[in-house]
């Protein structure tokens, strides 16, 4: 059974319906895109803003005064600030008792809850995840996992206190992170304690070490833990999951109760030169021409547009796609741009892939309303 | 019927500058014009629609690169480069010869053509005038260049120049013979002749006899002294007919564009504005000519790159923002948009001043803004003096 759609109160009087896709920023921009090229997108994205570039330039944002999305020139949309960049692999071993190491462009900043909140106040996001410790990879010791939980709760309490005394954050939502790695007891304790605090939502954290490998989550290991955590959380508050999610994993996570996702999957696929073609609507579409060599009965999520088989293929990435790239450009052109390592290649792929994934989420929301998610699942 | 109509609208009453329109199969181009370089069928990360938004009407592609990738077969199937890259406006292609000689160590010029070793499979290849025309025909550019015998302008051997000059004329005749569609594509010859006034003149005269729709001035903007450079431009434009466009290859610095427009040049191309954007350098109309947005000095600078620039970047973003994302590809895109806008705006300003017959005054104020200490480069003083403009 899929979870009912959930309205998130947004800034500027907007409301946001879940399951919601947040478009992940990288260092202060949607990867490969600018405000000008984002305007070619049909759907205005909501954003996930990793904290490292924010805390490393708190002073700049403080002087600027108008908040992060304004500084980045992004449309006034929902923005959520989060400690780690889900698209970048973690660098373990740099946290301390009092701080979490955040990296950006090879620069490490050891961030305390106080520094973090200074960044939050300067960035003025619609929502933020309290500073947390998610360094609990598969194989982490029990001590380390317990530590991640207690440290995250301590950091959460301090973030909550600072938020309460800061009028500029009165409209910002605060999310608490559920930690504890692959340990049922730690997870149960983290969930129970976090629920008791006045948070507006939850980040289900610490199941992977971010980066492209986050997509390799072993579902049989993670699923029972995820399920018990989500059962312990109140139904009325949104749950965010960060990390690369294939279409199938997205549906699996939605089914057990995740409400919010981010777009690092799209980023990794774009970097790999892939164009997404998985079914993203319920409408019966003419099956996308998967290229002359791919067999049509085999489900493929993407086309590898680097493949020379697309050299003279003058069809769009996906036949029925209405995105800018598919309306204006061909597989052959993108294949050429990737072969010559031209910057426009990832630009066109990012526009298509982001659009394709956004439409997927729109379909998911429609399916949640009509209780037809199983029909979508059957296509994936 | 020619695929180019060139109309001179105004001539500067002091300098040799002119403002014209050049009607091409895919666009009407207002000159003097700067052509941004889209080497491999794309302009450094910009969507064709972004170039349209900048009102860019003519861009350049490189025959050598396009002949390798995507190659003639793909270009033919796509219906030419315009369709392949979805660029509705005008294109100009070089002949491929210059790129080869400058990029490939082993390129060797014979009477037949440019012999080279393929960088892909090490096989021996030959770019002949006929082959260059074939590739350029598959690209379908509005303006094509003849294959010319390129010699570095600083080359010491005068005999080599003599050979190059004569061969360039012979190769032009072969290109003209191979040219299939004069109603859809224009072929420009290239004035060579090294740094010798008489040889330049002679080369120009012999090319003029062939009655082509326009002319390029080549073999410059290499390592030659600037005083030699401007003199050769001056000599060439003196010889070339007034009713046809003149294209100075490989020139794109702001000061050079202003001075060479005064010497009577109508068209320019250069990789500089887009290449420099990749290194975080944003062009400005005054001293010091560019801002290095990587510099920490811009961390708290919330002004746009240029207050007066109408480009999307300057209308929407601050120097501080671009500085903050300087390691992301997005920063390069933002600066590239601005730098292309900068070049187009400079050319538009030059043109408007020619039309209003205020070009000499514009040159003076432009040079002062770029050299506020009035330490003008000697070559620019000399070049401008030759066309009646004093820098004081
Ligand atoms: Zn598309
Ligand atoms: Zn600008």
Image (spheres, coloured by chain):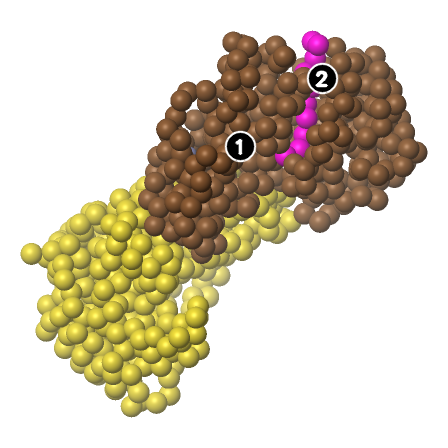
Q: Nearer the viewer, mark 2 or mark 1?
A: 2
Q: Residue at x 80, y 43 (%)?
A: A92
Q: Is residue B7 above or below residue A32?
A: below
Q: Colour of chain A?
A: brown
Judge whether A131 appears above or below A57 on screen.
above
Q: In screen coordinates, is B295 left or right of B61?
A: right
> Residue at image x 84%, y 39%?
A139
Residue A210 percent coordinates (x, y): 70, 38
Which image quadrant for residue A102?
top right
Given residues B89 and A244, the one toward you in this image is: A244
Reading the image, the residue beneath label 1 is: A73
Q: Which residue is mark 2?
A: A201
Which residue corresponds to the image point at 37% horizontal and 72% vertical from the top-left?
B100
Same chain for the residues at labels 2 and 1, yes or no?
yes
Looking at the rendering, the stretch of residues picked out in magenta corresponds to: A235-244
x then y, percent, for residue A74: 53, 30
The tint of chain B in the picture is yellow
Instruction: Report the disc number at residue B161.
Output: none
Residue that sits furthest to the left in the current view: B1
Say what secondary structure mark 2 lies in: strand
Is residue B201 visible in the rendered image? The answer is no
Looking at the rendered structure, the secondary structure element under dot 1 is loop
List x then y, in percent, for residue B97.
32, 71
Q: Quadrant of residue B236?
A: bottom left
Residue A189 falls left or right of residue A329: right
Question: Residue furthest toward the right?
Answer: A143
The quarter of the picture where residue B161 lies is bottom left
Q: Is residue A29 left or right of residue B257?
A: right
Mark-to-mark CA distance, 2 and 1? 27 Å
For disc 1, the neighbor class at 10 Å (few under 14, some 14 to 19, many from 20) is: some
């Amino acid at each position: 059974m899929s979870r009912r759609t959930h309205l998130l109160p947004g800034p500027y009087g907007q409301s946001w319906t879940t399951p919601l896709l947040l478009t992940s920023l990288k260092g202060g921009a949607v990867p490969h895109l600018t405000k000008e090229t984002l305007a070619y997108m049909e759907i205005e994205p909501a954003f996930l803003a990793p904290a490292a570039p924010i805390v490393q330039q708190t002073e700049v944002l403080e002087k600027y005064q108008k908040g992060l999305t304004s500084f980045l020139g992004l449309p006034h949309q929902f923005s959520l600030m989060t400690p780690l960049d889900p698209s970048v692999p973690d660098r373990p071993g740099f946290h301390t008792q009092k701080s979490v190491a955040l990296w950006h462009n090879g620069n490490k900043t050891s961030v305390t809850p106080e520094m973090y909140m200074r960044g939050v106040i300067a960035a003025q996001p619609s929502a933020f995840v309290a500073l947390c410790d998610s360094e609990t990879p598969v194989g982490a010791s029990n001590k380390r996992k317990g530590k991640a939980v207690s440290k995250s709760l301590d950091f959460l309490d301090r973030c909550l206190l600072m938020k309460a005394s800061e009028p500029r954050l009165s409209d910002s939502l605060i999310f608490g992170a559920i930690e504890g790695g692959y340990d049922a007891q730690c997870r149960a304790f983290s969930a129970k304690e976090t629920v008791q605090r006045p948070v507006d939502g939850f980040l289900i954290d610490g199941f992977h070490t971010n980066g492209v490998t986050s997509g390799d989550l072993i579902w049989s290991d993670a699923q029972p833990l995820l399920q018990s955590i989500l059962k312990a959380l109140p139904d009325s508050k949104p749950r965010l999951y960060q990390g690369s999610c294939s279409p199938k994993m997205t549906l699996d996570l939605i089914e057990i109760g995740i409400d919010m996702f981010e777009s690092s999957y799209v980023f990794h696929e774009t970097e790999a030169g892939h164009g997404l073609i998985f079914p993203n609507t319920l409408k019966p579409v003419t099956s996308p021409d998967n290229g002359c060599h791919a067999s049509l009965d085999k489900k493929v999520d993407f086309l590898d547009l680097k493949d020379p088989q697309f050299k003279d293929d003058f069809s769009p990435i996906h036949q029925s796609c209405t995105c800018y790239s598919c309306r204006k450009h061909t597989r052959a052109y993108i294949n050429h741009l990737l072969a010559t390592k031209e910057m426009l290649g990832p630009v066109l792929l990012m526009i298509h892939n982001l659009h394709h994934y956004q439409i997927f989420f729109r379909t998911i929301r429609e399916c949640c309303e009509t209780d037809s998610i199983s029909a979508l699942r059957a296509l994936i | 019927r020619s695929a180019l109509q060139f109309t001179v609208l105004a001539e500067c009453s002091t300098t040799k500058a002119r403002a014209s329109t050049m009607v091409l199969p895919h666009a009407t181009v207002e000159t003097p014009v700067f052509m941004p370089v889209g080497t491999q069928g794309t302009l450094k990360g910009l969507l064709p629609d972004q170039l349209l938004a900048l009102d860019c009407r003519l861009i350049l592609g490189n025959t050598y690169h396009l002949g390798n990738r995507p190659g003639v077969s793909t270009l033919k199937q796509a219906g030419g480069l315009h369709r392949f890259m979805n660029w509705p406006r005008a294109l100009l292609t070089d002949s491929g010869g210059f790129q080869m000689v400058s990029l490939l160590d082993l390129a060797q010029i014979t009477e037949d053509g440019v012999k080279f070793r393929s960088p892909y499979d090490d096989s021996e290849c030959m770019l002949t005038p006929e082959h260059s025309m074939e590739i350029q025909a598959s690209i379908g550019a509005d303006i094509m260049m003849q294959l010319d015998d390129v010699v570095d302008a600083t080359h010491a051997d005068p005999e080599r120049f003599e050979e190059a000059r004569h061969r360039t004329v012979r190769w032009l005749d072969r290109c003209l013979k191979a040219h299939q569609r004069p109603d859809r594509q224009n072929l420009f010859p290239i004035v060579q002749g090294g740094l010798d006034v008489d040889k330049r003149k002679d080369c120009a005269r012999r090319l003029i006899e062939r009655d082509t729709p326009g002319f390029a001035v080549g073999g410059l903007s290499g390592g030659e002294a600037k005083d030699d450079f401007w003199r050769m431009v001056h000599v060439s434009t003196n010889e070339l007919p007034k009713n046809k466009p003149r294209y100075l290859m490989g020139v794109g610095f702001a000061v050079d564009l202003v001075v060479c427009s005064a010497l009577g040049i109508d068209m320019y191309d250069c990789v500089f504005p887009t290449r420099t954007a990749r290194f975080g350098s944003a062009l400005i109309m005054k001293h010091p000519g560019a801002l290095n947005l990587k510099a920490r000095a811009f961390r708290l600078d919330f002004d746009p790159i240029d207050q007066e620039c109408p480009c999307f970047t300057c209308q929407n973003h601050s120097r501080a923002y671009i500085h903050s994302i300087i390691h992301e590809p997005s920063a390069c895109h933002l600066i590239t948009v601005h730098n292309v806008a900068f070049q187009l705006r400079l050319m538009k300003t030059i043109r408007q001043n020619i039309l209003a017959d205020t070009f000499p005054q514009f040159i003076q104020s432009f040079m002062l803004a770029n050299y506020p200490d009035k330490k003008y480069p000697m070559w620019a003083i000399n070049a401008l003096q030759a066309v009646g403009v004093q820098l004081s």
